[in-house]
Amino acid sequence: MLHLHALGHFHPENLIDNAFLEALGIDTNDAWIMDRVGIKSRHTVLPLDYIRTTKNRDPRAAIEAAQMSNAETGAQAGRMALERAGLEASDIGMVIAGSCSPDECIPAEANRIAAELGIDAPSLDISSACSSFASQLYFLEAMRPEKLPDFIMVVNPENSTRVVDYSERSACVLWGDCSSAAIVSPRLPGPWKITNTYLNGDPSGADKVKVPRFGHFVQQGAEVQKFGVKRGCETFEVLREAWLKGGEGRTADQLNFIGHQANLRMLEAVARRSEVSPERHLYNVDRRGNVGASGAPSVLSEYWGTEKLGKAIAMCVVGSGLTWAGALFERS
């Protein structure tokens, strides 16, 4: 079992709303976007003028144009998490990171983020694209507690608008930028416990969602949507059973749902099939877009410290690979 002490998030300032995308002249509009994906706006590290004039034809140019790096946005989320936990950078004994579009092949993104925060500790990446956060928790929970430090920072820096083709409407209506950071401990109690984790995968689907080196994000949309709904429901069922078996007096309607923030219509399908009522379904994809691995943890972070989170949360995420993973959070 892991203990969750705090979460933090960071959204860059530049905002891409549906009117901006319509003005790009790519045969889309607010009604089309809302009908298909239910997203009103998304954030980006890219200057809006850069997107408007180039449509990001060359993702290599986006690296230069971006106003913040993954290390900078990840560190911003980390600072919020530290403040909420009442900790200092010197308290962190390990940094784990993972995302869909890292800045470099080496070093690990975790090293860049740790340096940005002034953390002097082992730092490494565990990445499974959009399912990275729950995958990271799965591996940390499986490790021997005595091998781990008191506090670990888990960061998901996601600035994937840099690999989006803004002349292709099916992709550019989805993606936004966000970074999240969680502080967990294998032994010191916090306000939440992570009592169960789950991880599964199907490598035969590795080509269904890709970001080639120096290329744009591509996916087989219809198949990925079906995969996301099916595996999201599967993961929720695993976590629901774990919740119900965890103690007397527990009921299914005490369990809230946070899914992979791919698009609102996919999330609604998972919630409907899993019999999750609207008041138990927490999301931010309508305002933030698909922000990859930081999506689900950023929802938890945005509601941090509120009663809206309820007694327990089933976090169910899917990602390229193909992978799907989950974590069960319970109030301490």
Image (cartoon, grey):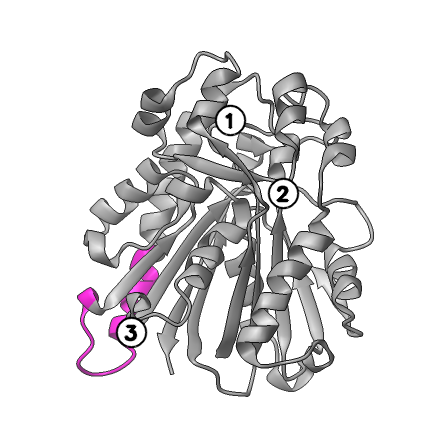
Q: Which mark is residue 159?
A: 2
Q: Which residues are magenta?
A: 236-253
Is residue 269 among what the camera can see? yes
What's the residue at 73%, 22% (across, down)?
Answer: 58
Q: Position of residue 15 (x, y in %)?
A: 52, 37
Q: Secondary structure at mark 1?
A: helix
Relative to residue 194, is residue 266 depicted above or below? above
Indicate the quadrant containing the C terminus: top left, top right, bottom left or bottom right. Answer: bottom left
Q: Position of residue 300 (x, y in %)?
A: 42, 62
Q: Residues within 10 Å of mark 1 (few under 14, many from 20)?
A: some
Relative to residue 96, is residue 269 depicted above or below? above
Identify the residue position indicated by label 3 in the image.
311
Residue 282 horizontal side relative to residue 290, left or right: left
Q: Secondary structure at mark 3?
A: loop
Q: Earlier in the sequence, mark 2 or mark 3?
A: 2
Q: CA distance from mark 2 to mark 3?
A: 32 Å
Amino acid type of disc 2? Asn
Q: Earlier in the sequence, mark 1 or mark 2?
A: 2
Q: Which mark is residue 88?
A: none
Is residue 97 among what the camera can see? no
